[in-house]
Amino acid sequence: ATRFLFFLSLYVVLRLSLTRFGLITLPPSVGGGSWISGPESLREVQLLRGRVDAIVTGVTTVLHDDPRFTVRPPGDPSKPPLRVILDSYLRTPTDSKLFAPPGPGEGAGPIHILCQAGANAARHVALERAGAKVTGLHSSEEDHVALRDVQEWLWEQGVRRVLLEAGPQLLSRHLEEGFVDQLRVYTGNVMGGEGPTMAPWFTRLRLSDRLDREVADDAVLESFVLPSS
C-alpha cells in the first residue's frame, strides 16, 4: 500500500478544447491548420505549460495532431516541461514535429516515450536515435501501459505537476483511475465537430470551486475534481 502514497502529491491538470457541440475534433469545413480555441486561450495554455513539470499525452494525439508541446511566450520557455508520450507499441513517427529543434524564444523539454516492456526493439533504437528516451513499463489489463506505473515513473523523475493534453481514450482512463485533480476546459466558438464527446464523464465528476469565465470568444471551465464517493 505504501507504494502508491506518492499519488497524494502528484498533481494532474486535465486541459481540453471542445467545440460548441462538445466535440474535440474540428469539423472538416473549418480546414487544416485551424484551432478550436482562440489566440487568447492559446496564450493561457502557454502560461500553463510553463508552470508544470511534465506534459503527458498519448500516441494517438501525436499521430493525429503532430503536436510539439513546446513553451512559447507568454509562458516561461527557460524551464520547459518533460514531454511524455504513452505509446505502448512505439508507433510514434521519428519525423514527428516533437523532434524538431526549438525555434527562437521557444522551450522544448526532453522527450520520453513510455511503452510496454519488450516492445519492438528496432523501433526503440530508431526513436532513441531521433532524440527520445524510451522506457518500458508494465501493461494493464486493457493492453495499455499501466497508468499507475506511469504515475510512479513521473514521480521518480522529480515531476510533481502534470499537464494532461490528450485524446478522449487517455483522458477517460485518467478520470476512471482518479488521477485528475483539476480541469481546465476551453469551449471555442466553433460549431459542429467530430469524434467522441467527453460530456458523459464531466456530468459524472464531483467538482469543487467551479469557475466559469470567458476569454474573448471562448468559454472556460475551471474546477477541482473531488474523489468519487
Image: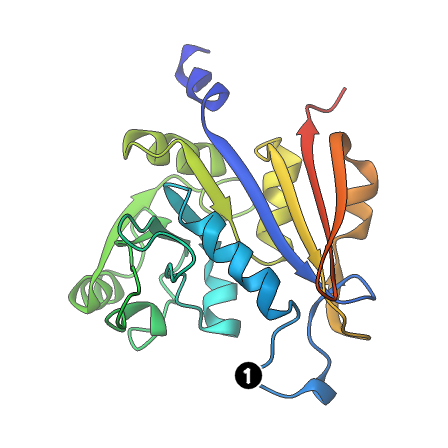
Give the secondary structure at mark 1: loop
Write down the quadrant of residue 18 in the picture.
bottom right
Where residue 183 sits in the image (x, y, percent)? 65, 42
Task: Relative to 78, say whether 188 is above or below.
Answer: below
Task: Relative to 65, say whether 52 is above or below.
Answer: above
Task: Write the residue at 59% across / 58% down.
Answer: 167
Task: Write the residue at 44% across / 42% down.
Answer: 139
Q: Nearer the viewer, residue 46 or 142?
A: 46
Q: Residue furthest top?
A: 2
Neighbourhood count class around disc 1 (C-alpha, 10 Å): few under 14, some 14–19, many 20 upward:
few
Task: Relative to 203, say whether 99 is above or below.
Answer: below
Write down the quadrant of residue 26 in the picture.
bottom right
Where residue 88 sits in the image (x, y, percent)? 41, 54
Where residue 180 sits in the image (x, y, percent)? 59, 35
Apparent side of residue 41 relative to residue 134 in the rendered image (left or right): right
> Which residue is disc 1 drawn over?
33
User: Looking at the rendering, in which quadrant would you find the C terminus?
Assistant: top right
Apparent side of residue 54 relative to residue 99 in the rendered image (left or right): right
**In the rendered structure, which amino acid carries the disc numbered 1?**
Gly
Task: Write the residue at 51% across / 65% down.
Answer: 61
